[in-house]
Amino acid sequence: MESFLSNFMKKTKVLRNNIKSCIAKLQAKIEIDEIEVHDSDTSDLSDCVEIGEIVEADSVSEEEDESESDCSSDDDDEVKSHDDDALDDTNSSTVASKENTKKIYIPGQSRPLKEGEELVCDKTAYVMLSSFYTDYPCLSFDPLPVKAPGSDTKCSFPMDVMLVSGTQASHPMRNRIHVMMLGNLLELKDDDDDSHSSDGEEKSRKKRKNKDTKIFKDITIDHRGDVNRIRACRIETTTLCATWSSLKKVHVWNLSAAVKAAETVFGKKSRDKLDEKPVFTFHGHMDEGFALDWCRHVPGQLLTGDCKGNIHFWKMVQGGEWQIDQRPFKQHQSSVEDLQWSHQEANVFFSCSADRSILVWDCRMAPKDACVFGIPEAHRKDVNVISVHRTEPWLVSGGDDGLLKVWDFRRIQGFGPVVLLPFHKGPITSVSWCPHERSVFCASAEDDVVSIWDLVGNREENADICDMKILSRIPQQLIFLHMGQIDIKEVNWHPDHEGVLISTASDAFNIFKTISCRLDGVGLLVQAENRVLESAETLTDRHLGPCRARAEAHFQLLLQIDQSS
């Protein structure tokens, strides 16, 4: 028995050394940038730290703290006896610095605001931030590209931005379409640097601010009924827009004259009204609706969906007219909330509904057979909005359950979403893929928050401005939060300027560009780096996991032998 134990202990010792050597080699291979895999003693597997685990400073044992304090107590007493005043000054300055430290407020995660506290916008997080408003709230809008297709979209200042929006007025006959031009938008200036400037510098700064006044031009067109949804398209040199009216009608408008007027009207602030009429109106819907989308492949093709679950397909014919099949695409059991044409296939489109489903259609087929496949229970509640990626087979959806889900067309049936992002505390009201960055999209919700997401997960965690415990409860893909508006309904990227977002709410529009979404090619580097990290983690799970499992099994066997002897 003793010889058996002796041989077994020798073999176990050799195995233990081999395991330690294997772990050390693997750790050396997967050591990348900020991730360090620490070689730990295999005799105490419970102390091993897995890759990606957050280790807090508070996790140091109380015994170590006590031992250190005992060893240094005498020295500390001597220091205190001679330098009490210096320590008091240091402590007071530390307290003051803590009181003035900025902390990121994250809805649903940070503590509730106390009485007298209010949120303050940190403008250092923005490259550009501006707001503007119309006489009545515009709860739907669409950016109007001014640059020709293929033009340079890099963000530069001063910046000019154009968009079209529709109002929801107190009376149906007071509604309008607004074609707005915002000109001379500039980068935010850091006024803190000038706080101690001389009188001459202060005067110079004031002159600069007066010179930097932005330009606002507003061209309006009367619209009968609230504008539930508005979407624009450009066919050659003509700019069209379609509006969903609360009076159960869909109108098509020619905005070319309004766009020209907005570009040529002089003055820093100017308003003008055009007497325009719809070039086409469809009366075939049995109820009002909100779903609307232009096809990007075939000029003039349009989809409209109503609250009865009907989807109508529009084809543009010669003479500026539209041919509309009176037989609707009918598969949803409730209101059609959103419609999106595919960016890869000219005849494929997607729909979402209050019946919690997302469906995929082929418009070449008869309406009763056009539904190719779908996801019956895409969300736990109503599916409010969807957005289709321009180059990848991805779709992002948002629902009344507050969830954001990313789906892959290639395995959309039976596999579930490829990414699930639980963060918002209210129904999702808008989602939009970034046209300039492959992995980035934005969303808005009824919790009055606009969120920016990067599927690469390139969030910079800074413990100085945000509690690590809070960060650990937030999806890694969340990179920016924009707040300060009330009842946010839509958010979208402007196609002319990389990284520029526009959001609309019941109180005002916001237009902004954040520092965390520079879109200068860094995303490609991060994406490649992320693939390396994924490979490293896979390698670790594949090799270190079994090694540790075997080692633990051998140690348990040794323990049993020791106890039996």
Image (cartoon, rainbow, N blue to C red):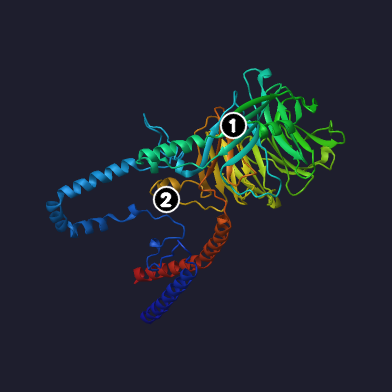
Q: Position of residue 300 (x, y in %)?
A: 79, 38
- Residue 262 in view: yes
Q: Which residue lies under the disc numbered 1?
A: 216
Which quadrant of the structure image shows residue 39? bottom left
Location of the N terminus by quadrant is bottom left
Which residue is outermost to the front?
200
Q: Secondary structure at mark 2?
A: loop
Using a 10 Å C-alpha cutoff, classify the residue at mark 2 as few (fewer than 14 neighbours), some (14 to 19) or many (20 or more).
few
Mark toward the viewer: 2 or 1: 1
Q: How many marks?
A: 2
Using a 10 Å C-alpha cutoff, classify the residue at mark 1 as few (fewer than 14 neighbours), some (14 to 19) or many (20 or more).
many
Q: Is residue 42 above or below residue 105?
A: below
Q: Which residue lies under the disc numbered 2?
A: 462
Q: Position of residue 341 (x, y in %)?
A: 73, 42
Q: Position of residue 314 (x, y in %)?
A: 81, 35
Q: Is residue 180 above or below residue 25?
A: above
Location of the C terminus by quadrant is bottom left
Name the foreground residue: 10 vs 313. Answer: 313
Q: Position of residue 30 (x, y in %)?
A: 49, 67
- Residue 107 in view: no
Name the foreground residue: 39 vs 130. Answer: 130
Q: CA distance from mark 2 to mark 1?
A: 38 Å
- The first of marks 2 and 1 along the sequence is 1
Q: Is 37 displayed left or right of 373 in the figure?
A: left
Q: Is 214 displayed left or right of 362 in the figure?
A: left
Name the foreground residue: 437 vs 562. Answer: 437
Query: Which residue lies at the image location 55% right of the left edge and 39% below the top edge?
Result: 185
Which residue is outermost to the right?
318
Q: Is 509 displayed left or right of 205 in the figure?
A: right
Q: In the rendered structure, which amino acid carries the disc numbered 2?
A: Asn
Q: In the rendered structure, which amino acid carries the disc numbered 1?
A: Phe
